[in-house]
Image (tube, helix red, strand yellow):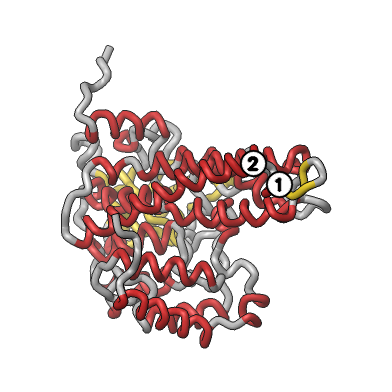
Amino acid sequence: MNLSFSAEYEKFREEVRQFLAENWTEADRAATPDAEGVGAMTGAALRTDDRATEFRRKAIARGYMYRHIPKLYGGGEQPPDPLKATILADEFRRARAPFEIMGQGPSMLAPTLVVHGTEAQKQQFVEGTLLGRIRWCQGYSEPNAGSDLASLRTRGVLEGDHWVVNGQKIWTSNAQDADWMFALIRTEPDAPKHDGITYMLIDMKTPGLTVRPLRQLTGDADFNEVFFDNVRVPKDSIVGERGRGWYVSRSTLKNERALIGNATFARRTFDGLQMMAQFTEVRGAPVIKDPVFRDKLVELEGHLLAAEYNGHRLLTAGGRGEDPGLPGIVTKLHTTTIGYHIGKLAMDMMSDRGCLAPGEQNAPAAGMFGTGYMWYFGMALGGGAPNIQRNVIAERGLGLPRDPRR
């Protein structure tokens, strides 16, 4: 395997570096300490500022961001190129510059709307979502419909020009901060359970919609219950055809697993762990010099590199229009497992100081890793629990027989 870049790609790298040097200065970095959105990895609400937004506009115009989204809807519109995508991610990370916002709206909904949305929906939502001006939450899981999502019961009845929605969603991430929800609603109760589901866009300020926080292990309340009591949703707020929401949702679920399984989250966390290892002491010396911790760091980076190179393989297959097969369905399970072990190693490095909450005096790395360690338990469940993922890999990827049904 040749992992070097050709002269053509090295020239592209220099162009990217020049752009970053001219448009994201040291003053910008100092004024925007979380420009990369690292806080969002531990459940913090998405926040953007004018400085980062203006920079993203310039980067999009150059074709450096959201390359898969047409220019008409605010994207960079570039042909698939996994090597350029790799260079961009590396150089933006090196410059600590804002890159693509990674979240439910930009990473999951926007690509779904580009494929399945109406022209009006694309014009109304995509660009604002990419820039973080419109915040989204996902209304999928219900108290009796989690892993078996097709069992959802939240009901929508068409009355004139509106759907009247009643029911409940649960484990709705960041619903307390969201402007809109993309939701699966049962509109044809007599149809088979995978049929009769409609994909809707719902304004979170609609009367009758109530958000209640769910306190979690971290002490925060990033998850919520959402209740619908005769919530009136405009008739034209559906994505795709009525009763075909399950088909549309497959695009969103694919993007969700790609988001959660993206090695970028784990890489950012690992880079922060390496930095902390240089400034945290154990037995009177920096952790980075301890042979046991160094060995664990090297082992973890080996797994992380494997995840990153598998991502390159998936990009290549996607660019060729090929089905990646097994490599495409292991990413979410593999990468969230890596993230958990990164968080666990960070806790070992910090010892009892890892129990300090964010903002407390003497909390290493401002308490980010303690929160991140607990957050990765939730990341492992999002988009399909680990045991569900292992069954999918075994049955669909390896062709093993299904578990016997009793």
Q: Residue 240, image x and y in percent? A: 22, 58
Which image quarter holds the C terminus?
A: top left
Can residue 99 be seen in the rendering of this structure?
yes
Q: Residue 158, image x and y in percent? A: 27, 52
Residue occupied by mark 1: 287
Residue 293's disc number: 2
Which image quarter holds the N terminus?
A: bottom left
Instruction: Judge whether 324 appears above or below 340 on screen.
Output: below
Instruction: Judge whether 274 appears above or below 151 on screen.
Output: below
The amino acid on which the numbered mark 1 sits, given as a three-letter code, is Val
Q: For the point 55% across and 57% down, which residue is it?
A: 40
Callout 1: SS: helix
- Of pointers 2 and 1, the one earlier in the residue sequence: 1
Q: Are marks 2 and 1 in contact (CB under 8 Å)?
A: yes
Can residue 158 be seen in the rendering of this structure?
no
The amino acid on which the numbered mark 2 sits, given as a three-letter code, is Phe
Q: Residue furthest toward the left?
A: 321
